[in-house]
Amino acid sequence: MNLVILLTTVAQKSQARQLAEASLEHRAAACIQILPGLESHYFWKGKREVSREFLVLAKTTPVRHKALVKLWTKIHPYDCPEIVALHGKAASAYARWISTATSS
């Protein structure tokens, strides 16, 4: 069965928790994982940057995916947030749980 994993990064744990809380409250995601200790290297406004960040992973359905992107875009603290969707397959029981958890 299909699922979508949405990922983003934020600078602070409190920001990651805000994304998680809103995602679950709006039933846009079934599960959020927050991974600390990420080191990001990138160019921003013509300068090379290095930042410590938190990686936020959300599991959702293809049906709820757009709602989750819209929500994260609205509340994300970055000017240009990384919001990436990975589409894949999940074990049937897990996919059913995600579908149930994101149903209104």
Image (spheres, rainbow, N blue to C red):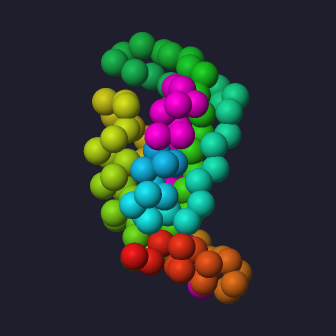
Q: Which residue corresponds to the image point at 53% horizontal and 31% vertical from the top-left?
A: 14
- Residue 68, magenta (yes or no): no
Q: Position of residue 104 (x, y in %)?
A: 40, 76
Q: Nearer the viewer, residue 69 or 41?
A: 69
Q: Give the residue drawn at x 40%, y 70%.
A: 64
Please state the extent of the stretch shown in magenta in the rendering.
1-18
Which residue lies at the image location 47% right of the left edge and 40% below the top edge? Answer: 18
| Quarter placement of the N terminus | bottom right
Q: Is residue 13 magenta?
A: yes
Q: Residue 7 placed where, x, y %?
A: 52, 50
In the image, 78 versus 39, the foreground residue is: 78
Where is residue 33 drawn, in percent x and y?
Answer: 64, 50
Q: Nearer the viewer, residue 55 or 88?
A: 55
Against 33, residue 45 (above or below) is above
2 in relation to 30, above or below: below
Note whether 101 is above or below 54 in the view shown: below
Number of marks in picture = 0
Q: In the image as oriented, which residue stretches furthest toward the top?
A: 47
